[in-house]
Each structure stands twice: as C-alpha cells, then as structure tokens.
C-alpha cells in the first residue's frame, strides 16, 4: 500500500472568484457592476448620516436607475448578485436620505 501514503505535498484548492462564469470577458458590464455595488454601499452609508441627506438622495436615485439598466443587460448570475445588492443599498440610502430631508 505504498500508493496510499503519498509524500508529495498537496495543494489546497482555492476557488476562483470571477464575474465571468460563462467563460467570456465582459469588461464594461463588470465595471458597471462594480460601480453599482460600491455606489449603492456609499448611498446607504450616506443615508445613515443626517447631514448628508442631499448626497444620499441624489446618489441613491442615480445608482438605482443605473442598477436597473445594468440588471437588464447583465450576462451572468454573479453580476446580478452584486447588482441587486447595490440596488438595494441605493434604495435604502435614497429612502433614508429622503426621510432626513431629501432635496431640501
């Protein structure tokens, strides 16, 4: 049973994180996905701050609109997951911004 005890070191399988699960490159869609995700998070963070209500409202509305279009043209499931997360963050940030004073 010499083959059962291997002396070669085994490499741990590290999963590859990618937005291109279909095997094709989508550089523009990936950039829009990242933009929506990070802008949604920023809108949510600004929505928590009462003094930043105008920025949260404007950023939230813009990100929500871009996110809906990005969701429409997205190509892979991974992109859609990040886009929806950004849309939800933008919506909540926009709602908090409106609740704290909106455009006024």
Image (spheres, rainbow, N blue to C red):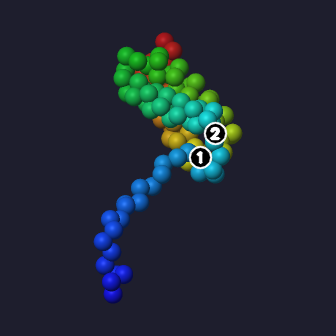
Q: Residue at x 47, y 16 (%)?
A: 54
Residue that lies at the very extreme toward the right in this rendered image: 73
In the rendered view, tell whether residue 86 sits above or below residue 78. above
Of residue 80 and residue 87, the one placed in the foreground of this image is 80
Q: Nearer the viewer, residue 72 or 64?
A: 72
What is the number of the mark on residue 75?
none
User: Which residue reaches farthest bottom?
Assistant: 1
Q: Measured from the top left, where is residue 76 in percent x and y? A: 62, 48
User: Is the Cβ of the residue at disc 2 closer than 8 Å to that at disc 1?
Assistant: yes
* Residue at 37%, 60% in the rendered image: 12
- Which corner quadrant of the image does residue 32 belong to? top right
Q: Is residue 95 visible?
A: no
How would you rate the neighbour count of disc 2 (Cα within 10 Å): few for under 14, some for 14-19, many for 20 or more? some
Q: Is residue 79 visible?
A: yes
Q: First in sequence: mark 2 or mark 1?
A: 1
Q: Say which residue label 2 marks.
A: 26
């Amino acid at each position: 049973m010499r083959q059962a005890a291997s002396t070669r070191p085994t490499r741990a399988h590290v999963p590859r994180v990618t937005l291109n699960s279909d095997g094709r490159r989508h550089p523009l869609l990936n950039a829009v996905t990242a933009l929506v995700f990070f802008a949604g998070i920023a809108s949510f963070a600004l929505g928590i701050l009462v003094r930043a209500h105008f920025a949260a409202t404007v950023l939230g509305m813009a990100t929500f609109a871009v996110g809906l279009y990005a969701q429409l043209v997205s190509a892979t499931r991974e992109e859609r997951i990040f886009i929806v997360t950004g849309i939800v963050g933008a919506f909540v940030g926009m709602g908090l911004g409106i609740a704290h004073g909106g455009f006024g």
